[in-house]
Image (cartoon, rainbow, N blue to C red):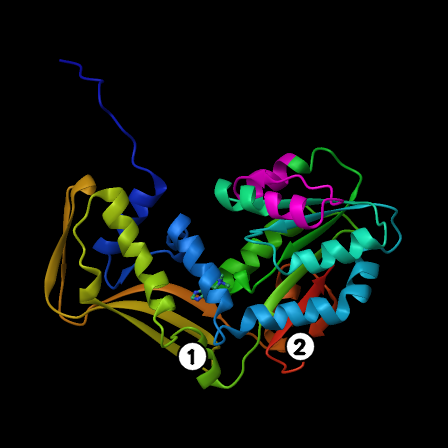
Amino acid sequence: MNRKTNIVLPTEFEKEVYEGLTDSPKHLSSKYIYDSYGDKLFQEIMDMPEYYLTNAEHQIFNSHKEEISNLFQSGNDKFKLIELGAGDGRKTKILLEHLTSNNVNFKYQPIDISHSVLAQLEASIRREIPEVCIEPLQGTYFEILNRINIENGTKKIILFLGSNIGNLTHELAIGFLNHVRDFMHDDDLLFVGFDQKKNPETVLKAYNDPAGITSDFNKNILARINRELDADIDLDQFLHWEVYDPESGTAKSYLVSKKEQSVTIKKLGLTINFNAWETIHTEISQKYDDQTVQWLAEASGFQIEKKFVDTKGYYKNYVFA
Ligand code: AVJ
């Protein structure tokens, strides 16, 4: 008998959870931390004193808004400001305010995968800076870049802030940058935030706060498996563990099983066994130096036009052309 009913294709999330937890060593992708609860926890992380990245980039925008705005405008009477993974836009708003108060002709196009993040961002900009012409675009970066590239001609400034690039290995970062460059024309610019190598103690603290917000954030990937895939993972039986290698500049996040245990993920029909102290690798947050950024730029066909740094030298924004 030909039974065609009830064939449901697995989602990306389901596939990656299956593959990651049956692999050895185990791993899960940090992109799945960000559901609405994960988004909220990341906002809390940005407010923590230990998470220096947000303040540093904020400071760069504040002290260089004039120069950055001029760079964005140079030679053109209008441009599109496209932000990849806009989040709450708290740093971009500094620029938006500066540009509008100088009557610059531009359109702000924040791209995010999350509907709710975009809706909140749009509402807050309409409230705080109503003069801004904003067009939120929901989807993955390259889907949207593909779509908006059709309406051509206007100069594009692409923002990729917050050292979001640090979630990618160098190999993936080069692939990503190359792909972005495919969408760019001669005058277009890419403005990217790269968190810098610094005292390893400072880095570790940023990813291992005493209040445990980062731990909750990391564990949200397990909480999400519980919620969405009907699993029975006891979050208390996992430990958030951060390591930082000052040579490579790679901070790595793990969830470590505190005991021998098994968990059942009903929706995948899967039982996973953990040895005591077995790890799940969840995230990398890469730290950079100028040589490494120079190499990444060259390897993806870009030139570095300019860089901006905060007073502590913790963080840099680079202009790629
Ligand atoms: C949003 C990817 C830039 O890696 O610093 C914060 C995410 N992880 N604390 C980072 C994060 C743990 C963050 N990025």
x and y percent of residue 16 in the render? 32, 48
The N terminus sits in image quarter: top left
Identify the magenta region.
122-147
The C terminus sits in image quarter: bottom right
Q: Residues within 10 Å of mark 1 (few under 14, many from 20)?
A: some
Task: Tell which residue pokes out farthest to the front in this image.
Answer: 127
* Residue topped by disc 2: 310
What residue is at 49 percent from the left and 72 percent from the top? 51
Tag 1: amino acid: Lys
Instruction: Tell me, yes or no, if residue 64 can be seen here.
Output: yes
Q: Secondary structure at mark 2?
A: loop
x and y percent of residue 83 in the render? 63, 50
Tag 2: amino acid: Asp
Tell me: 27 left or right of 319: left
Q: Secondary structure at mark 1?
A: helix
Mark 1 or mark 2, which has the lower sequence index?
1
Q: Residues within 10 Å of mark 2 (few under 14, many from 20)?
A: some
* Residue topped by disc 1: 205
x and y percent of residue 181 in the render? 66, 51
Does the magenta segment cover residue 135? yes
- Mark-to-mark CA distance, 1 and 2: 19 Å
Tell me: 94 left or right of 84: right
